[in-house]
Amino acid sequence: MLHLLYILAFTILAVIAVANLIRNLIMFSFDRERHYPATRNQGRYGYSSGNKNFPPHPELLDNAGNLIKEPLLVMRSINVEDARQQLDALYESSPGRKVENQEEG
């Protein structure tokens, strides 16, 4: 009898989960067709370019402080030795590493 109760409970939960999944997919397709108006300060890539209240993240800026105009997910290939050298250089130049060197000496 207890087995039947478990089967019934999990069947009800599965039906609710599938119904919720279908409802979410339908709502997502309706939401995707909706066009949202661009705000006044919104730039070409979807983040604000002129809003003084919220400065852009530093990774979105080039060395001169201007917003970058290139894709953010472009990765260049690097071999293991170059990556190890760059990580070692970062580790050696970190502020915590200088304190450790002074304590050891």
Image: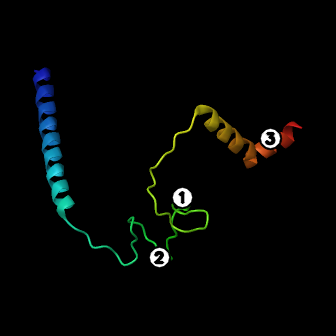
SS label for mark 2: loop
- Against 5, residue 61 (above or below) is below
SS label for mark 1: helix
Q: From the image, state whether disc 2 or disc 3 is nearer to you.
A: 2
Name the residue rendered at 14%, 40% in the picture: 18
Colouring convention used in this rendered image of the protein: rainbow
Which is more toward the observer, 16 or 57? 57
Which is more toward the observer, 63 or 33? 63
Amino acid at circle 2: Gly
Name the residue rendered at 14%, 50% in the picture: 23
The tag on residue 50 is 2
The spot of residue 16 in percent (x, y) is 14, 42
The spot of residue 50 in percent (x, y) is 47, 76
Amino acid at circle 3: Glu
Q: Is residue 90 left or right of residue 59?
A: right
Spatial separation of the CA atoms under disc 2 and disc 3: 43 Å
Q: Residue furthest right?
A: 105
Amino acid at circle 1: Glu
The tag on residue 59 is 1
Name the residue rendered at 18%, 62% in the picture: 33
- Against 18, residue 41 (above or below) is below
* Rendered-image quadrant of the C terminus: top right
Q: Which comes sooner in the sequence, label 2 or label 1?
A: 2
